[in-house]
């Protein structure tokens, strides 16, 4: 048996104070509270339109105009909106989807390969015209697409490639932002001593690129591929100028032509195709959904790609 005795305080001895655990108090400064409120406002500003875009196809026109904008209708209405869109012009919507996938994937592969090769050469080699190429790449990054569409059209028309897949893929294959990202990444992440030692041992530049640069650049490849996918998937102006047959449109151009002829978005001029507001929202959801899904699946690799190369060594 264990006996527990209370120790009495002896004369002249300072009584011991019992230590009690204090619960941590959460204190937020006014500046932190303001920062949280601003971030919450931006989150609401970005998320509410996306939520509306998902919920709108489940409602009817009357429910969207008179009811709550974020109310859920029924899945049957969403299926009906999808069927109405895909039935337009004997299912040309499926052609637009396939064209978008084809244009995007081929342009993405070419742009990633070109960006890696160009970025590696600019970061590790010294040759005449190197600074000029970097300057031209930076200028191409900041030029608006409308400024280069006419010269591109004249070039493509000179070789008689207008209204073909090549007229969309070839201009999109050169991705200046990807070249600049690859240049920055290789310039900060590849040890120059390792490259010099490999060259002394007789390793060729092709072997250096394939054996050293490419394995190190996996986060960069994911980052460039993601940004190239977004740019090519949402590409509107270039296919709009280059393509003349509706069966060769990609999704942004095809849906733009579809919406331009519906009274849902143009009450004054659209009278030929009665696309309703929920069906117009469904059309927008078709374009947004692949980008959102791809971002959710690969966001970890995107963060690694953005942070990789930020510090040298």
Image (cartoon, rainbow, N blue to C red):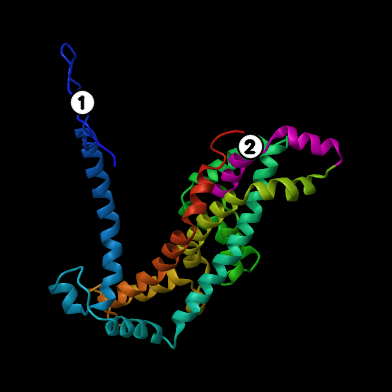
Q: CA distance from mark 2 to mark 1?
A: 71 Å
Viewer-closest of 83 and 211: 211
Label 1 crowd (10 A; few <14 / some 14-19 / many >=20) = few
Q: In the displayed image of the protein, which residue is found farthest to the left? A: 66
- Quick one: quadrant of the C terminus? top right
Residue 7 shows which numbered tag?
A: 1
Left or right of residue 191, residue 285 in this image: left
Q: Which residue is mark 2?
A: 187
Image marks 2 and 1: residues in contact by CB distance under 8 Å: no
122, above or below 270, in the image: above
Q: In the displayed image of the protein, which residue is found farthest to the top? A: 12
Q: Is residue 192 magenta?
A: yes
Q: Residue at x 19, y 30 (%)?
A: 6
Residue 178, horizontal then vertical, whole percent: 57, 49
Q: Which residues are magenta?
A: 177-202
Left or right of residue 9, residue 168 in this image: right
Left or right of residue 188, residue 34 in this image: left
Left or right of residue 62, residue 153 in this image: right
The number of callouts visible is 2
């Amino acid at each position: 048996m264990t006996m527990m005795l209370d120790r009495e305080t002896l004369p002249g001895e300072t009584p011991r104070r019992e230590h009690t655990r204090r619960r941590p108090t959460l204190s937020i400064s006014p500046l932190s509270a303001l920062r949280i409120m601003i971030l919450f406002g931006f989150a609401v500003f970005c998320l509410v339109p996306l939520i509306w875009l998902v919920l709108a196809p489940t409602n009817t026109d009357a429910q969207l105009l008179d009811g709550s904008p974020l109310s859920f209708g029924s899945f049957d209405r969403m299926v009906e909106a999808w069927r109405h869109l895909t039935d337009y012009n004997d299912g040309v919507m499926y052609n637009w989807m396939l064209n978008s996938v084809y244009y995007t994937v081929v342009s993405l592969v070419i742009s990633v390969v070109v960006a890696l090769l160009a970025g590696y050469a600019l970061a590790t080699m010294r040759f005449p015209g190197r600074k000029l190429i970097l300057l031209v790449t930076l200028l191409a990054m900041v030029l608006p697409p409308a400024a280069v569409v006419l010269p591109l059209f004249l070039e493509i028309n000179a070789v008689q490639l207008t209204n073909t897949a090549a007229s969309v893929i070839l201009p999109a294959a050169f991705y200046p932002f990807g070249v600049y990202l690859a240049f920055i990444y290789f310039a900060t992440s590849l040890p120059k001593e390792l490259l010099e030692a490999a060259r002394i041992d007789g390793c060729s530049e092709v072997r250096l690129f394939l054996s050293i640069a490419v394995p190190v650049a996996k986060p960069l490849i994911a980052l460039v591929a993601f940004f190239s996918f977004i740019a090519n998937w949402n590409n509107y102006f270039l296919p709009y100028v280059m393509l003349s047959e509706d069966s060769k449109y990609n999704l942004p151009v095809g849906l733009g032509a579809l919406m331009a002829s519906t009274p849902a978005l143009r009450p004054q001029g659209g009278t030929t195709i009665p696309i309703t507001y929920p069906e117009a929202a469904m059309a927008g959801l078709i374009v947004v959904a692949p980008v959102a899904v791809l971002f959710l699946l690969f966001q970890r690799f995107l963060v690694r790609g953005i942070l990789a190369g930020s510090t040298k060594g």
